[in-house]
Image (cartoon, grey):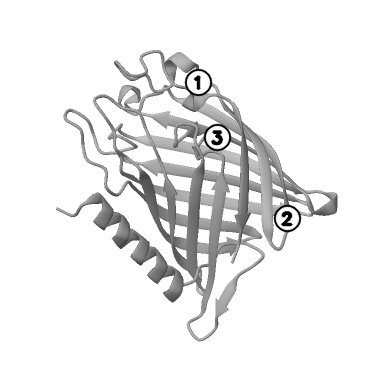
Amino acid sequence: MRTKSGLLAALRHAWVAAAALLLPAMPAAAQTAIPSLGLTVTLTPVIANDYLFRGISQTRNNWAFQGTVDVQHDSGFYIGAFLTNAKFVASPWNDTRQELDLLAGYRFELGGVALDVGYIAYLYPGQDKAPGTQLNEYHEVALKASYTIDIVKLMGAFNYSPNFFGRSGDGFYVEGGADVTLPYGFTASGRLGHQWIQRNPLFGTPDYLWYSIGVSREIYAGVTASVAWYGTDISKRDCIPVADRASGGQRACDGRVLFTLSKVF
């Protein structure tokens, strides 16, 4: 069995190899084109004071260091990966330290609407399954759409998992939002999402709503800073209670300010 250090080393080598060979592409200002292969590629490192996924902290309210690589062909097909640190509380234990998401899909435009049909694998390399518990990993299919009207970009998304995080059964997710271009290079953003989970006790929360509102701007040499307020409608007592460790719930679902720095290569 591969050790955690060996697995992490392999992941780092794979990440470097992917970046060197593919060098990614996402809808962003700075991109690298490889005309001979018909590829557009982008690499995006991020530093944030938390890792929030659909409004819930995945790092127990600690800092996150992340990277995204995305490679798109001229045909619209793409592959990508997202790597971040992660940390959870569980009983008797949960040794998750990183999350690796693998993505693939097809982007195209129809009637002025940008569409993205994709698949996401949420993996947690190195996690060992504690007795009587489930592995975190799961998969989703996703549909995203966006439409731009002058300074406003409207967005929507629908995700479905046949066996959501922690083997919690069917997971349905919808999200809507908007980005508004403001004077002096600022962009204001708002998001509203709702997550439905079939077996709530295995996931750790009831079905819930989350929201965010924030602003971003390039501050220097392509580095973009953003600050936003995130919140959910989950009370602390219903936020992932863990017997003997957090029986009264956790602060992972509390409202908070999220600050990020990112740069697109």
Marks 1 and 3 in Cβ contact (< 8 Å) = no
| Element on which disc 1 rests | loop
Which residue type carries mark 1?
Ile
Residue placed most toward the observer, 205 or 47: 47
Q: Residues within 10 Å of mark 1 (few under 14, many from 20)?
A: many
Q: Mark 2 or mark 3, which has the lower sequence index?
A: 3
- For the residues labelled 1 and 3, the Cα–Cα distance comes to 13 Å
Q: Mark 1 or mark 2, which has the lower sequence index?
A: 2
| Element on which disc 3 rests | strand
Q: Quadrant of the C terminus?
A: bottom right
Q: Which mark is residue 234?
A: 1
Residue most toward the left?
1
**Please, is residue 6 above or below residue 174 in the view?**
below
Residue placed most toward the observer, 186 or 4: 4
Q: Is residue 131 left or right of residue 203?
A: left
**Please, is residue 152 above or below residue 207 in the view?**
below
**Please, is residue 145 above or below residue 42 in the view?**
above
Residue placed under numbered mark 2 in the picture: 218
Marks 2 and 3 in Cβ contact (< 8 Å) = no
Q: x, y (%) of residue 118?
A: 44, 56
Which residue type carries mark 3?
Gly
- For the residues labelled 1 and 2, the Cα–Cα distance comes to 33 Å
Residue placed under numbered mark 3 in the picture: 193
Instruction: Let me know if residue 120 appears in the view.
Output: no
| Element on which disc 2 rests | strand
